[in-house]
Amino acid sequence: MGWAVATVDRIVHRVVVATHAPYLKRQLVRATLICGPGEYPVSWGQGVQTFDRPHLRLEAPRADGAGAEVYGVGLDDFLATYSNAEVLGTYRKTTVTMARIALEPCVLQTERKGERVRVSIAVGDYLVREVDGDGEYHVPKEQFEAMYVPQEGDRSRAS
């Protein structure tokens, strides 16, 4: 049995998870600079993502093909983790993402850099952390599998 623990995150209920494995983002996003606070309902759980300061509003194609996911990213985080993509006006996340599968349901509560989120995590969903990041976040199984590919050359997979 294990705990998903990070210095800025709090697991409200115990969670058992598989071993981390590295992944890269496959999708392109469009970014809009928002010069003030913002609030985004999170589609990957129950709750709201809030920003108290300027940030980027990102739009990414939904895993089911029905419209776009809309969420926010802090300016520093965006500059450190995204680069221009091959399609004009789009960006791709370039950092390695470590992910693990929840083997029991749990609740993840995150508060960092002016962003607050609390989400319920189902069995089979992923807890995701950027290699250079300081917190974990939740991505539902279907969405994760549409958004990420295993890092090339890695033989270990979360199971």
Image (cartoon, grey):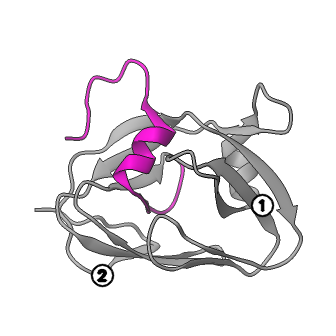
Reading the image, the residue beneath label 1 is: 56
**Residue 91's spot in the image, x, y percent?**
74, 39
Going by the image, does 85 lie left or right of 67? right
Q: Position of residue 18 (x, y in %)?
A: 20, 49
Q: Residues within 10 Å of mark 2 (few under 14, many from 20)?
A: few
Residue nearest the observer in this picture, 77 or 13? 13
- Residue depicted at 17% across the width and 58% down the height: 103
Q: Which element carries disc 2, helix, strand or loop?
A: loop
What amino acid type should be assigned to the residue bearing mark 2? Val
Could you say which is closer to the camera, residue 87 or residue 108?
Answer: 87
- Above or below, 151 relative to 55: above
Examine the image and state in which quarter residue 155 appears: top left
Look at the numbered disc 1 and give the secondary structure of its residue: strand
Q: Quadrant of the N terminus?
A: bottom left
Left/right placement of residue 46 relative to residue 57 reads left
Disc 2 marks which residue? 12
Q: In the image, is 52 to the left or to the right of 95?
A: right
In this rendering, the answer to whether 13 lies above or below 57 is: below
Residue 42 appears at what percent x and percent y?
55, 70
Query: Residue at the location (57% across, 49% down)?
Result: 62
Q: Across the whole image, how many numbered discs are drawn on residues?
A: 2
Q: Residue at x 58, y 51 (%)?
A: 66
Question: Is residue 130 on the magenta stretch?
Answer: no
Q: Which residues are magenta?
A: 132-159
User: Looking at the rendering, in which quadrant would you find the C terminus?
Assistant: top left
Check if residue 154 falls in the magenta segment.
yes
